[in-house]
Image (cartoon, rainbow, N blue to C red):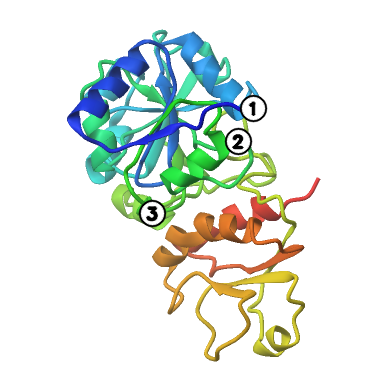
């Protein structure tokens, strides 16, 4: 039996050892404010190849690189005024830029493209780690490819514990869904490629203009990660409801089906009825979504039925995850 990855607390000794492991081309799992990531030295082609192997991730799906600040970004990308403006407004935080890459970034990171996705996370433990590194970190979500993203160190240990050695524990991820990705290769015409933890409206307010939204008909899979039709998926089949699930249905529902509501129902119901928020707050729903899907996926249910969120603000990111989770080939 393969050993299980060790979960380490973020003290100076462990942080120093993790930086050493990264310099030596090893993989480590790390917390961010969005989800846990599986990190490697982004300048080390062999180390990045290990990410694809551990996750069983297709090579045409690019990785996101992580840097401490905008100054570091300029070493790896061709930047522009729009990127500088958004970084000043939202970095560190859950916003990823797609920009023309410099030759220092290996092709394996970008799936052979001349652009790279980069962000600066705000999680204090992540910042402690990366501020002591002299290289960016490539770090997709620390889970098997297309499975539910991890928001606890224990989630990583459960799914990748036999493929990596160490996991840095930063507690529960505050935001719970991945970063918003915006294409800034043409600074005059930015486009959101993936909805995420930073609402599109906030980006538009910062730029004082409306920006293009994801093209669901022609998804730029090769440019932005996390945009394949099937992603964030439990192994249990998931049905998505576009309208609220009524109490009458819940009262006669099959106990082999888990119902996932946006808010707590008004009356006490069976333990196969679950909810994401007391009052339906979108930030609470996003923060609990992946952890609750994991709980239901291991609960012995035959099916999960979930409600869509309102189509605005953070609800766009929540629904994007749910739709990909419900996708069936």
Nearest to viewer (mark 2 / mark 3): 2
What label sits on residue 190 in the rendered view? none
Confirm or deny contact between disc 2 and disc 1 (CB under 8 A).
yes
Name the residue that disc number 3 marks. Answer: 175
Tell me which label, 2 or 1, sits earlier in the chain. Answer: 1
The spot of residue 85 in percent (x, y) is 26, 39
User: Which residue sits at x=31%, y=34%?
Assistant: 120
User: Which residue sits at x=27%, y=42%?
Assistant: 122
User: Which residue sits at x=36%, y=41%?
Assistant: 32
Name the residue that disc number 2 marks. Answer: 144
**Distance from Cα at disc 2 to Cα at disc 3:** 20 Å
Instruction: In the rendered view, tell whether residue 240 sits above or below residue 117.
Output: below
Confirm or deny contact between disc 2 and disc 3 (CB under 8 A).
no
Residue neighbourhood size for the residue with mark 3, other residues' Cα within 10 Å, grouped as few (<14), some (14–19), many (≥20): many
Confirm or deny contact between disc 3 and disc 1 (CB under 8 A).
no
The spot of residue 210 in percent (x, y) is 42, 52
**Distance from Cα at disc 3 to Cα at disc 1:** 26 Å
Name the residue that disc number 1 marks. Answer: 56
């Amino acid at each position: 039996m393969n050993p299980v990855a060790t979960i380490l607390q973020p003290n100076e000794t462990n942080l120093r050892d993790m930086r050493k492991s990264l310099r030596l081309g090893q993989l480590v799992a790390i917390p961010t404010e969005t989800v846990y990531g599986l990190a490697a030295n982004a300048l080390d082609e062999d180390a990045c190849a290990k990410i694809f192997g551990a996750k069983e991730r297709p090579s045409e799906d690019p990785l996101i690189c992580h840097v401490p600040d905008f100054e570091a970004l300029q070493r790896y990308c061709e930047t522009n005024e729009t990127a500088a403006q958004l970084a000043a407004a939202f970095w560190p935080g859950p916003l990823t830029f797609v920009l023309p890459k410099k030759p220092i970034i290996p092709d394996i990171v970008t799936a052979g493209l001349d652009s790279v996705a980069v962000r600066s996370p705000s999680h204090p433990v992540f910042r402690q780690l990366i501020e002591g590194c002299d290289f960016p970190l490539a770090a997709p979500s620390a889970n098997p490819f297309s499975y539910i993203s991890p928001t606890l160190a224990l989630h990583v240990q459960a799914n990748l514990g036999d493929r990596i050695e160490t996991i840095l524990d930063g507690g529960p991820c505050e935001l719970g869904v991945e970063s918003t990705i915006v294409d800034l290769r043409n600074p005059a015409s930015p486009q959101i490629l993936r909805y995420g933890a930073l609402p599109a409206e906030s980006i538009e307010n910062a730029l004082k203009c409306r920006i293009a939204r994801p093209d669901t008909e022609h998804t730029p899979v090769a440019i932005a990660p996390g945009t394949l039709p099937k992603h964030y998926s439990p192994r249990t089949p998931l049905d998505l409801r576009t309208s609220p699930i009524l109490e009458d249905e819940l009262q006669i529902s099959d106990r082999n089906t888990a119902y996932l509501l946006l808010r707590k129902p008004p009356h006490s119901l069976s333990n196969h009825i679950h909810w994401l928020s007391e009052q339906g707050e979108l930030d609470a729903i996003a923060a609990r979504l992946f952890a609750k899907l994991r709980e239901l996926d291991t609960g012995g249910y035959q099916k999960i039925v979930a409600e869509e969120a309102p189509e605005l603000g953070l609800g766009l990111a929540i629904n994007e995850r749910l739709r990909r989770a419900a996708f069936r080939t």
